[in-house]
Amino acid sequence: MVGTTRTDDRTELFARAYQAALDRWPVPVASEPVPTRYGSTHVLACGSPGAPPVVLLQESGTTAVAWRDVAGGLASGHRVIAVDPPGHPGLSSPGDQPPRTAAELAGWLDEVLDGLAVRRAAIAGHSYGAWLALRYALHAPERVSRLVLLDPTDCFAPMSLRYRLRAIGVLARPAASRMRRFLAWETGGRPLDEAWLAVVTAGQDLGRAKIVLPRRPSRSELAGLKPPVLVIVAGQSRAHDPGRVARTARDRLPAPSVVTLLQASHHSIPAGDTDELRRHIEPFL
């Protein structure tokens, strides 16, 4: 009984933090459940329903509220759809089994777009979400009009050993305090959006995210990518070598646009550095 109460308290804390972040959304936003074979997927939608759609996918272990300020800017000309993937913290209701392979993960996103009556969309992703966005563009190029990859992990370069070693404790025993220390290390102590940080840390107390382990696309897969691609690299990222990410993206993608945000770290985006992000993303879309 005590354990159940403690779990309920953590769930309530997370729900309050999520709602508090949502209350700060800069434009009207709607929460929508989308049924899939992997359970009900929760999305946040803003902007005119008739505007060109853009789908936002965040890093693992975080939620759709990470995109708050970016979404608010994009909503003036787009229907913006930010997604809480199954198996991650968020308001999605998981089914009996989350997606277990990259193909199943792509099939899940097919179902989300079908459920929203979106035939084709621009897709932007950060970190693990960038890997998912890239994988989906390789899976269904006819459904992706443009692709934006924000400091993408496991797309063009491996994650750094020091980052992996630091992340082990957070992944093995997720807890709010460990996540705060990890983010402070990666960002060099840079101030982070407090509403976003409250959601991220409360989500850690809910347990481990269930993710499909990423595999970097091959050179031939990247060479055959159809949609136009914008790659935005965090110049201070400790997740990987920013220079290698930029060079490999230029070398292996057909005619990419590659931009480096010199002061950004891997975890300062997309909830931070939003003015710079929007300056590059909005004209591209």
Image: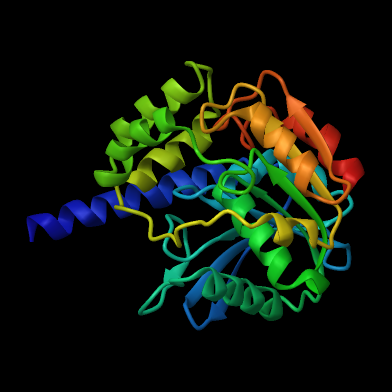
87 to 159, vertically: above or below: below
Q: Nearer the viewer, residue 158 or 133?
A: 158
The residue that appears at 72% across and 32% down in the rendered structure is 274
- Quarter of the picture holding the N terminus: bottom left
Q: Is 284 placed left or right of 232 in the picture? A: right
As drawn, 162 above or below 70: above
Q: State the residue at coordinates (15%, 60%).
A: 4
Please name the residue shown 28% across and 49% down the image.
Answer: 10
Q: Nearer the viewer, residue 147 or 22?
A: 147
- Up/down of 153 relative to 277, above or below: below
Rendering coords of residue 244 (x, y %): 65, 32
Label count reads: 0
Residue furthest to the left: 1
Colouring scheme, one of rainbow, by chain, secondary structure, one colour: rainbow
Is 186 on the left or on the right of 78, as rendered? left
| Residue 30 in view here | no
Residue at the spot x=55%, y=66% of the render?
Answer: 42
Residue 108 percent across, percent down from the top left: 57, 75
Q: Where residue 240 appears, x then y in whole percent? A: 54, 32
- For this orientation, the residue located farthest to the front is 220
Can residue 231 be seen at all in this image of the molecule? Answer: yes
Q: Is residue 29 left or right of residue 104?
A: right
Q: Position of residue 214 (x, y in %)?
A: 50, 56
Q: Examine the rendered structure and indicate whether residue 65 appears above or below residue 225.
A: above
